[in-house]
Image (tube, grey):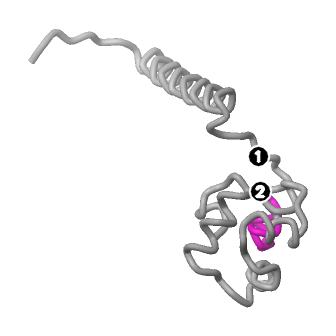
């Protein structure tokens, strides 16, 4: 066993807390850098709260991007009625459909399901 140091528990806890703070700071810096590169974006709490409250993620993201169902339909090559059915929960949508919608909304498929 190597060298050992004995310190008071309060000092040990303070060092642990400082290490956790440093990890949080580094994580925050990575997020900020990703946003600056355009690899990520900040999402308003209102948007997250709407999704958590049970609203259709597709509808929430579409409205957040300022698109109508028709505009998204034309851009993504997906039938507008299918978008309406996905938003209402009557249909899930195929992987290809969700992929196209996600691409045109600038999100991942996971963000839509």
Image coords of residue 55 (percent x, y): 80, 72
Q: Which residue is drawn at 52% across and 19% down?
A: 18
On whether residue 58 falls in the magenta region, the answer is yes
Callout 2–callout 1 Cβ contact below 8 Å: yes
The residue carrying pointer 1 sits among few (fewer than 14), some (14 to 19) or many (20 or more) residues within 10 Å by Cα, namely few
Q: In which quarter of the image is residue 34?
A: top right
Image coords of residue 44 (percent x, y): 82, 47
N-term mark: 2 or 1: 1
Above or below for 74 versus 80: above
To which residue does mark 2 refer?
A: 48
Query: In the image, 18: left or right of 83?
Result: left
Above or below for 77 versus 8: below
From the image, give the main secondary structure of the stretch colored magenta.
Answer: helix
Query: In the image, 83: left or right of 102?
Result: right
Distance from Cα at disc 2 to Cα at disc 1? 7 Å
Q: Which mark is residue 71?
A: none
Q: In which quarter of the image is the N terminus?
A: top left
To which residue does mark 1 refer?
A: 43
Query: In the image, 25: left or right of 78?
Result: left
Q: In which quarter of the image is residue 68?
A: bottom right
Q: Residue at x 66, y 61 (%)?
A: 102
Mark 1: secondary structure: loop
Q: Which residue is drawn at 59% across and 63% down?
A: 110
Residue extent of the magenta highlight: 48-59
Image coords of residue 20 (percent x, y): 51, 27
């Amino acid at each position: 066993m190597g060298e050992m140091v004995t310190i008071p528990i309060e000092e040990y806890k303070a060092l642990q807390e400082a290490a956790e703070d440093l990890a949080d700071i580094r994580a925050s810096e990575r997020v900020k850098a990703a946003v600056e590169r355009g690899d990520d974006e900040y999402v308003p709490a209102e948007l997250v709260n709407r999704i958590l409250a049970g609203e259709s993620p597709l509808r929430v993201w579409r409205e957040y991007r300022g698109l109508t169902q028709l505009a998204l339909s034309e851009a993504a090559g997906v039938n507008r009625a299918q978008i309406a059915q996905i938003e209402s929960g009557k249909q899930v949508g195929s992987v290809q459909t969700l992929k196209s919608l996600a691409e045109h909304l600038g999100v991942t498929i996971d963000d839509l399901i």
